[in-house]
Every structure is written in structure tokens, then in C-alpha cells.
């Protein structure tokens, strides 16, 4: 009887120690980056400031975003940035810092979104798929041997949505699925290309998994998940293998980065007044609506602890067409703009904090909880354990 009592006390103390550790330690941290547009100025400014603040607060000049987030999600140009900061360089470190990723996208923007020569009867601007293919291939490959990186070759779990025309349903690329089967492992450059195939601007993009067993005819993931935050939250809540301690949104810490409104008030006003509009304008309005709807839903889900969900958006700033020196001015403007927060059950309120200050406050919580402790890329496990791929 005494032995049973001692055993009970030991297990009680161990349980208390484990729970107290979890209470003060890490929540599962999600970084989500919207699609929309071709410049990514809003998300780019936020990412650079985020990583700069992480380095400042930790005192580590080599700290990177992937060190402090458990999962990264992105759509469209947000997926390109997400893949670049999450891709594994072969040594377990991210392939790009935030500043390097944003600079690469800015420097090669005219190649990523190379305008096709307009035909006599073509009024809409279309982009060259071949030009984007070449840039993405160059960016998302191993520097040592030039080998194309796949979903498994990431430092942290990555989520990227698209819409599959073959099944008429959303298709979400994820490292979790890729690590389960090669039939769900795709080359990273193709994943980014798929989620960027905006109707009316690019042709649908066809791609297959590394073993050729799964195929997809993809168009822009923004049509269904321009703001992929909800997809990331749902993935974490239901993925008990990678996130066993998550039971609800109270276990999450979420940073969602917008990319500014795609259409100005005039374009929206013209549509509302019944004026004729191009399909690209309608698509942009749809993308904006999807992002705002997801933000509203998450604002409701986190209404009891609003500091666990932070949305960075530049509602008074449209970054399209801003290149060269003006881009730097635009990035500064984004961080100086006052933040906006969705209210439960509708509406928004203007905050006193700027976007830059909100990121700084968020980083304090990130750094206080320490670096993430998720396992490394599953491609490294397969190198030492041949059973990892089911063989």
C-alpha cells in the first residue's frame, strides 16, 4: 500500500512538472502568408521586420524565422516566400533568410511575372509561364548539386493550397502528406508554380508527384484559400503525429500576413454600380473577399485571447506596380500604417499600434517561448532509416 502511494506521488509530480513545462513553454506557432498581387510588398516588409526583430531580441545574428515557427503556409506569391524561407539548404538550415528571399523576389519580379506580348484582340495582361518556371527552378534547388527540392526538403512543415481542375476541388500540398508517401511529394518549384496560376493571367499548370502516381491540373490557390491561415490552423488541430499537444486554438500562436487589397475603391465601386469589368478585376475582388472572410472567422475563433492571433494587413496600401526605389518606401509605409483588427461577428477597429509595433510585440512572445523543437526534414530520416518511405 505504501509502495502504491509512493508511486502515485511520483507520477503526480512528474505530471505536474510536465504540465507546468507546457504551460510556460511553447504554443504551436503558425506563420501564414497571403497570396494576391505580384510584388508581395506587404508580406515582404513584414517578414524582413519579423526576422530583424527576432535577431535583435535573441542577440543571435544568424537566427531565422524557421527557428521560431512550427509550420509555414502560403498561397501565390506568399507561397513562393514561404517555400524560400522554409526550404532546407542541405544542412538543416533555411535556404534563404527573409531578407534574401524578399530581395530575390523583388530583383527577379520582372522575370517571375513577365508580360506576354499582347495580341491584336487581347485586352487582358497575361504572364509567361515559361519565364516563371525558369526562375522558380533556379531559386528552389540545392546550391551544391542543383537538385530540385521537394516538399520533404523543408526545415519546417509547409502548406500550400491550389485548386485542382481535374477533381474540381481544393488540393493542399503538405510536408506531412509528402513524408507519408512519394505519391504526395512534389517538387517545390512546381508547388509554387501551381498555386500561382491565376486564371486569366496564367494557363492552368499541370504537375505530377515525384513517383508520377498523383497528378493535378492547378489554378491559383487564392480562389479558395488566398488567406491560408484557416487551412494551417485546421491542419495543426488534426495532425496529431506532428502536433500531439494541440487540442484547440488556445494552444496556438498565429501570425497572418496579408498582401494589401488587390483592387482600389474605384474598381470595387464600378462593379457595385453594375459597370462592366474585366475578369481579372473580378478575380481580384474574389481574392480580397476570401482573405477578409478567413480573417473574420479567425477573429471569432480567437476572440477570448486576441493576442494569440495577429493579422498584419495594409488596408490603405496597394503595392502593385511599385518597383525599384519606390519599393523600399512602400515597405516603410506598410510598417508605419496603423493595424486593423477584426471584431467578433463583423466589423473592424483601427488600433493605436502600427503594423511594425504589432510584429515587435509578437516577437517578444516568440522569443520568450524559445526555439521550436519539431523534428527536422523527413528526407534526413529516410537517409538513415530505409523504412521511412515504407520500404
Image (cartoon, helix red, strand yellow):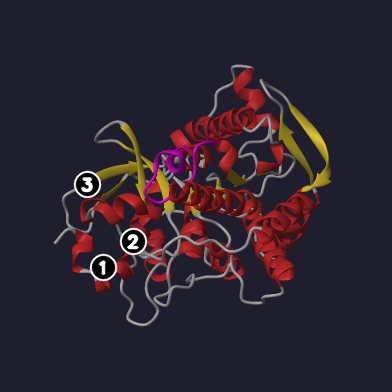
> Which SS does the magenta portion mostly show?
loop
Q: Looking at the image, is 190 positioned above or below residue 283? A: below
Q: Which of marks 1 and 3 is nearer the N terminus?
A: 3
Q: Looking at the image, is 226 positioned above or below residue 146? A: above
Mark 1 surroundings within 10 Å by alpha-carbon count, few (fewer than 14), some (14 through 19), many (20 or more): some
Pick out the residue farthest to the top.
274
Residue name at image x 40 percent, y 51 percent: 242
Residue name at image x 59 percent, y 17 percent: 274
Disc number placed over residue 215 in the picture, else none: 3
Residue name at image x 64 percent, y 54 percent: 41
Give how far across and how far down residue 135 sits, in percent. Answer: 42, 66
Q: Is mark 1 on a helix, strand or loop?
A: helix
Q: Earlier in the sequence, mark 3 or mark 2?
A: 2
Q: Are discs 3 and 2 less than 8 Å apart at CB?
A: no
Q: What element carries label 2?
A: loop
Residue name at image x 70 percent, y 54 percent: 365
Amino acid at each position: 500500500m505504501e509502495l502504491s502511494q509512493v508511486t502515485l506521488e511520483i507520477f503526480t509530480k512528474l505530471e505536474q512538472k510536465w504540465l507546468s513545462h507546457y504551460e510556460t513553454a511553447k504554443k504551436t506557432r503558425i506563420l501564414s502568408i497571403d497570396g494576391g498581387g505580384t510584388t508581395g510588398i506587404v508580406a515582404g516588409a513584414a517578414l524582413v521586420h519579423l526576422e530583424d526583430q527576432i535577431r535583435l531580441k535573441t542577440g543571435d545574428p544568424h537566427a531565422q524565422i524557421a527557428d521560431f515557427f512550427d509550420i509555414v503556409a502560403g498561397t501565390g506569391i506568399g507561397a513562393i516566400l514561404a517555400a524560400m524561407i522554409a526550404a532546407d539548404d542541405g544542412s538543416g538550415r533555411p535556404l534563404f533568410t527573409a531578407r534574401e528571399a524578399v530581395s530575390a523576389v523583388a530583383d527577379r519580379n520582372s522575370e517571375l511575372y513577365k508580360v506576354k506580348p499582347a495580341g491584336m484582340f487581347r485586352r487582358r495582361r497575361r504572364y509567361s509561364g515559361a519565364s516563371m518556371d525558369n526562375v522558380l527552378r533556379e531559386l528552389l534547388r540545392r546550391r551544391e548539386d542543383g537538385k530540385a527540392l521537394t516538399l520533404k526538403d523543408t526545415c519546417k512543415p509547409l502548406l500550400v493550397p491550389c485548386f485542382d481542375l481535374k477533381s474540381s476541388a481544393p488540393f493542399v500540398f503538405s510536408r506531412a502528406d509528402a513524408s507519408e508517401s512519394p505519391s504526395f511529394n512534389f517538387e517545390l518549384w512546381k508547388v509554387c508554380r501551381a498555386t500561382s496560376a491565376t486564371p486569366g493571367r496564367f494557363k492552368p499548370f499541370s504537375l505530377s508527384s515525384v513517383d508520377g502516381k498523383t497528378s493535378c491540373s492547378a489554378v491559383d490557390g487564392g480562389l479558395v484559400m488566398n488567406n491560408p491561415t484557416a487551412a494551417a490552423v485546421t491542419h495543426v488541430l488534426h495532425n496529431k503525429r506532428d502536433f500531439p499537444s494541440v487540442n484547440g486554438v488556445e494552444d496556438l500562436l498565429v501570425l497572418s500576413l496579408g498582401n494589401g487589397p488587390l483592387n482600389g475603391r474605384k474598381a470595387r465601386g464600378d462593379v457595385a454600380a453594375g459597370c462592366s469589368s474585366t475578369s481579372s478585376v473580378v478575380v481580384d475582388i474574389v481574392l480580397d473577399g476570401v482573405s477578409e472572410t478567413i480573417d473574420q472567422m479567425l477573429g471569432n475563433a480567437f476572440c477570448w485571447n486576441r493576442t494569440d492571433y495577429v493579422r498584419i494587413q495594409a488596408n490603405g496600401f496597394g503595392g502593385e506596380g511599385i518597383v525599384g526605389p519606390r519599393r523600399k518606401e512602400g515597405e516603410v509605409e506598410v510598417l508605419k500604417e496603423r493595424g486593423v483588427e477584426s471584431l467578433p461577428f463583423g466589423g473592424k477597429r483601427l488600433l493605436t499600434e502600427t503594423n511594425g509595433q504589432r510584429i515587435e510585440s509578437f516577437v517578444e512572445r516568440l522569443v520568450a517561448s524559445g526555439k521550436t523543437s519539431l523534428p527536422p526534414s523527413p528526407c534526413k530520416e529516410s537517409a538513415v532509416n530505409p523504412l521511412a518511405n515504407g520500404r
